[in-house]
Amino acid sequence: SAEGLKVGMITTLSGGGAGLGLDVRDGFLLAVKQSGRDDIEVVVEDDQQEPDVAVQLADRLIQSEGVDVLTGIIFSNLAMAVVPSAVNQDVFYLSPNAGPSQLAGAGCHPNYFNVAWQNDNLHEAAGAHMNEAGFSSAFILAPNYPAGQDALTGFKRFYQGELAGELYTQLGQTDYAAEIAQIRASAADSVFFFLPGGMGISFLKQYADSGVDLPLVGPGFSFDQDILGAVGEAALGARNTSQWSKDLDNDANRAFVESFQAEYGRLPSLYASQGFDTANLMISAMEKADVADMDAFREALREAGFASTRGDFEFGPNHHPIQDIYVREVVLEGDVLTNRIIGTALEDHTDAYAADCAM
Amino acid sequence: MTAPVVELRGLSRRFGAVEAARAVTLDLRPGEIHALIGPNGAGKSTLIGLTAGSLRPDAGSVLLGGEDVTRLDAVGRARKGLGRTFQVSSLAMELTVLENALLGAVGRSGQVMRLFRSALCDRDLALLARAALERVGLVEEADRRTADLSHGQRRLLEVAVALTLEPRAFLMDEPMAGLGAEGSRRLTGFLDRLREEAPILLVEHDMDAVFAIADRISVLCYGEIIATGTAEDIRRDPRVRIAYLGDDAA
Amino acid sequence: MSLSLLLEQILNGLQLGVMLFLMSAGLTLVFGVMGLINLAHGSLYMIGAFAAAAVAGATGSFLLGLGAALAAAAVAGVLVETLVIRRLYARDHLDQVLATFALILIFSEGTRWLFGSFPLYLDIPAPLKGPVTFPGGFAYPGYRLAIITIGLAVALALFWLIARTRVGVRIRAGQADREMVAALGVNIARLYTMVFALGAALAGLAGALVGALQSVQVGMGEPVLILAFVIIVIGGIGSIRGAFVASILVGLTDTLGRFLLPLAFGMVMEPSAANIVGTALASMAIYILMAAVLVVRPTGLFGAAT
Amino acid sequence: MIRERHLNALVLGALLALPLWGFWAEAPFMITLATRAAILALAAVGLNLALGLGGLVSLGHAAFFGVGGYAAGILALHAQSFTPMMTWPITIQGTTSMPLIWLVAVVASALAALGIGALSLRTSGVYFIMITLAFGQMLYYFAVALPAYGGEDGVSIYVRNAFPGLNTLRPLPFFAICYVLLGLALLLSWRISVSPFGLALSAARQSEARVRTVGIEPYRLRLVAFVISGAITGLAGALFADLNRFVSPAMLSWHLSGEFIVLVVLGGVGRLLGPVVGAGLFVFLEHWLGGVSDHWMIFLGAALLLVVLFARGGLIGGLTAGSRS
Amino acid sequence: MSLLSVEDICVAYGPSQALFGVSIEVGPGEVMALMGRNGMGKTTTIRAICRLIGLSGGAVRFDGRDMASWPAHRVARAGVGLVPEGRRCFAPLTVEENLIAAARPGEWTLPRTVALFPRLGERLGQRAASLSGGEQQMLAIARALMTNPRLLILDEATEGLAPVVRQEIWAALRRLKEETGVAILVVDKSLRELATIADRAVVIERGSTVWSGSIRDLTGEVSERYLGV
Ligand SMILES: Nc1ncnc2c1ncn2[C@@H]1O[C@H](COP(=O)(O)OP(=O)(O)OP(=O)(O)O)[C@@H](O)[C@H]1O
Ligand SMILES: Nc1ncnc2c1ncn2[C@@H]1O[C@H](COP(=O)(O)OP(=O)(O)OP(=O)(O)O)[C@@H](O)[C@H]1O
Ligand SMILES: [Mg+2]
Ligand SMILES: [Mg+2]
């Protein structure tokens, strides 16, 4: 289409991970609405967190709906299923959440942009923060799947202390008594964990009840707005790393937080901010180029000329963000649990795979 | 005297505290009907099971045509030529009557692993199956679902399936049970002729039938054979009268 | 590895076992005793947890939440039984699988529709918060001790109900031959509705109790469902005792597998790789256990031979 | 009421007409949808052989689907990256030739079915359901933890594999391949069902003792049926990998095993075309309801429920009023 | 007034009709024999009385009350005890559990029933599945007695029993008739034994009542024509 732009959003709207997909969608749609443009059409589809469904939807959106841009996928394994073939069919893919290492390194592609982070980023920042905070004997754990393995690898890339223990848990595990016993028995001075979704909620509740009171550090996902509501005060005081926080002090963010709350009646999450940024990136490119001219549009995307909720934002050579990553602490604001920035873990951080990208 | 077709030597089997067979020795000779009678729970069905191979003996052996088949299971013994009917019908209820009969023919032909030929269209199999149904008087029911048969009709089908196997010996566990007076009489006559083809080890509580056609009768009581003889011998045996016959001996 | 850690892990395994029994108790009744494959059992568990979270959240009382969980799950059970399941007793297992699979979809989406997509908050009741310290300095979370107690009580009560009461005899008779029990004068339809409701209530109870330790979210019932089936099958269908023994066995296998397998592989491999391989094997452990049990004993540990 | 034979012709015709219409109307997604239905139907045809004819309710058939899929994915991955699959003791290269991949997929899934079946068939009834589930879960967790092939992330095949003389990248030729394979599988399963083997297998489902007493060993029958069944499902898995150009552990999950059962029951257990009808309806509902509401799964559930409660013998049974053949 | 009255009932199994008009009257304390060849509809009639299959015509009354809309368990509670064809014991239950499962208070208690069938007494703890065929048959009768019925229905209840036991059962039924006044509807193949206990008989042929009257009037002609003896 000469003037308009059609976006296909494939995201998780049913099942256990639906909350994340909803936030990305709502953030994205909010930005589109605020832009006031009526030449953007967004088609939203539910991937049910199933890779084959996601692939089907991508095929349909590309072949039948003729979308120019795809976005929305939450989970890395779905992204790995969809992105490589989508970008080869001359569609742009803007990732609002997943950032698997393959797509940052050898598998990078000119039509693929990641607006969130490379998967390792927040874990790397956690490692850096642990050094700074003076922890020298960390106990680390994550689920046994690629993202979990990447998380611990990323953490260890920056963390310089000793490891009091390293554990992989099962995907979808709900009982952590055995792991907590091992933490208790170890000589650790702190715990780093990456347990997304319900796993993290279960772990945090059980950890709080166990009487082990070593300080907890995790990536932002484990302490974001969706999680905190379910964990309750058990999370109070825990530190986590994130490229965004509700209290980040910049105009774009203040406006975003306010308008999101006004529009949806809840606090925005990390995912909402990522969805919002993704849409704004796309809109900023539309202002400079027509999507029909792919090279020009790509160039416009690469410039990242939009006001990010995270403040400064630019793309590295592999189309992944170069950004600051902050340390947040879980606090009680009135009777709502939320996060507050207490420092910066890494400045202008890029990812470890850019060198492998031949772009 | 001709060599026995089936020979049981010292078969024993216990279930927990119950000794269902105690060193039972018995044979089945060509052309005869050997009836096995005895009180309920005496171990008759157990003995049939031990002979057919669906139960394993604790001790003793089973010979078929002089060959020791004790180590074969039910499948192996059926292949060697033992045809059996069950006390409680065990037919494939969803199949038609003809298909049940065909099953016996298929088993006999040993061609189960033929995946690509139609069973119903195979003339040899179909002839065999139909002939068996004809003999027990079920041809008219051939295309009905077995589940739709009445109890008595199913009993007859049991016998028909055993026929299609063309076995060397029949083991029949109460084939008359559930048949009406007329049905029993017909089946009695039929078995009377069938013994020419293969001898029959017949478990039955229908004394009219047993006394009418059995060449020899063995009486089983608490797992032991307490008497063997002709109908007359058995009728007169006081132990048998007390344990089993009651006033029926009259 | 110290001896005391090993002991604690064994205790954790036992604890997990009892918790698993509590989670599978309802299914033991419905599947084990009534012989009904109810895939929607996990949904009843979820309903219990959501009802508890919603009511405890609104009233601040965990006990009220627990009551709500029992009631909501039982009501859902009665509805499901009278509207759907009742027509399926006479059908084969496959129709039950399909119908209850459909119920999962309805319950999961329905719950999401009512409560939204975010996990709910349900906390341990204040009196049971934190660890209890035993003489000798050994500490164990009080709430988990409470769960163990309730699990054991439920086990005993179920065993008594099924094996020792006439209602239990009738339930089992109904499973063997439903028509015949009715022909002898037992109102089997009503009895089954009640038993199903009881099974559902037990599922709801487990959902509420365990929900305080885990994430209360849509789909939380599924892993429980699979585990509960595994347990009942290992124990032998129809045997409460079997289900209990199997729960403990599964709890120990899972906990000790997670704990020991990475250590074992660590002796022959580089630690990080050992961790990955060991954990992978540990996640298969209970399935390997189940397959092994069934290969050796095709009707489970305490199942009646067919 | 229609006769089942006429209904069957109608179903196969519709499955063919839909993509042709899609091609003509330039709605390529229709073709993709029909291809997906055909592949799922193929998998369910495999399951139906074990489940419908043999009464073997396997809740682990996704394992064979996944093995087939991974066979395709791994072979293609190595071929596309020009790395040999193994170098010792002999060098084996990957391949992108569909026929070769199918062969490997069929053999691999048949072997998996042989192993799993040999152990599982010692049990029966509900125990069988659960032990097949257990084996399925084992393979699932194995795949999740298989770092060489992506673990949970799976393997992407960037370009669809090739079939001599056809451009498989275009939707219609690929559909044609799947449709023909489905047809062949249906033919096979029909021949088997009327053969002595099929008769004995079906009898063994209903009365095991009966089959033994006519000298047939049910265990062997079932094992053979299970292996054929697994092999067909494995072939479907290989096609599914090519359809999505992607394989992942999700292909091995118990959800998918359950879905296969749903397809079979929905269409009608033991009916020749039951799986095709079931798959067609399921794919249609999924596609169509998805656009109706965010909470479309409620409607899907309700639709399934109605079929179980009111159409005995599945859709085919309902439409033909239960009269078989 | 009769205790049970079956009035011209019709029954179909799906599309195929099995009963085309069967009528039976059983008075209090009366013993009625139901006769007919294999497959003529005896069992179907009994199933219809017990409401295990629906009627497509006619009516069944018990104590003058129409049972058309009753569920099966209500029929049983009104006082109909069934010994079904093929025994149908609850296989996984023990003998004792089989007996108490549906027991209702009355003169038939566990000790009394066991006294009637001592063999069951020896096997109270054994699973019904492992009983011999005859033992299962005894269990089925005993189980029905334990419901203390006013009308006992026996469908081939002596099938597979040893002659002595059969005689015992007939004797027991005779005593039952004399002492307790329970009415009995009985299907059995042995005319000889039926004649010693039954007051009246109904003969059905292809799903219709073709003869009924006092069992003494069952002449050779009738029994040859309809029963084949
Ligand atoms: N599997 C078993 N477990 C325990 N006891 C058994 C088993 N099978 C049979 N019995 C017992 O062994 C005895 C013999 O049983 P069997 O079935 O051989 O008797 P039968 O002579 O055939 O009697 P009937 O004439 O009543 O059929 C019975 O007391 C029965 O209870
Ligand atoms: N479930 C069924 N479905 C279809 N037809 C049936 C069914 N049960 C019985 N029939 C048919 O109904 C007719 C009457 O059967 P019924 O069982 O009442 O006979 P019966 O007089 O009891 O015979 P028997 O003495 O052999 O037990 C028979 O022709 C039988 O084939
Ligand atoms: Mg017997
Ligand atoms: Mg009858």
Image (spheres, rainbow, N blue to C red):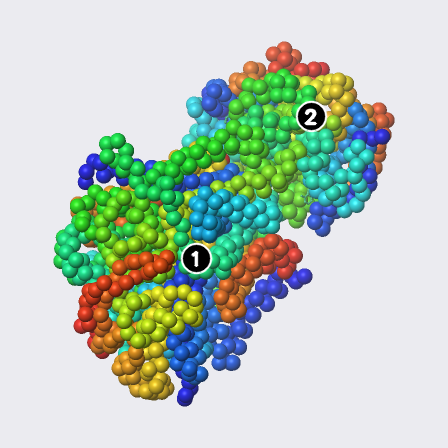
The chain holding disc 2 is: E
A324 left or right, relative to C21: left
| Mark 1 or mark 2, whichever is nearer to me | 2
Label 1 Cα neighbours within 10 Å, binned few <14 / some 14-19 / many ≥20: some
Residue with the most extreme bottom position: A2
The chain holding disc 1 is: D
Residue with the most extreme top position: B238
Viewer-side residue, A308 vs D187: A308
Q: What is the x, y in percent for residue A172?
A: 35, 53
Position of A89 relative to D6 (above/below): below
As drawn, the label of residue B83 is none
Split into 4 quadrants, where in the image is the N terminus of chain B? top right
Residue that mark 2 sits on: E148
Three-letter amino acid code at the position of disc 2: Asn
Question: Helix or strand or loop: what does disc 2 sit on?
Answer: loop
Three-letter amino acid code at the position of disc 1: Leu
Do marks 1 and 2 both belong to one polypeptide chain? no
Position of B242 relative to A323 (above/below): above
Residue that mark 1 sits on: D256
Viewer-side residue, E179 vs A7: A7
The residue that appears at 43% across and 66% down in the rendered structure is A265
Label 2 Cα neighbours within 10 Å, binned few <14 / some 14-19 / many ≥20: many
The residue that appears at 28% across and 80% down in the rendered structure is A304
The residue that appears at 51% across and 32% down in the rendered structure is C161
Q: What is the x, y in percent for residue A321?
A: 25, 73
Residue with the most extreme front position: A334
Position of C16 relative to A313 (above/below): above
D62 left or right, relative to E75: left
Kindly indicate whether the residue at mark 2 contacts the one at mark 1 (C-beta within 8 angstroms): no
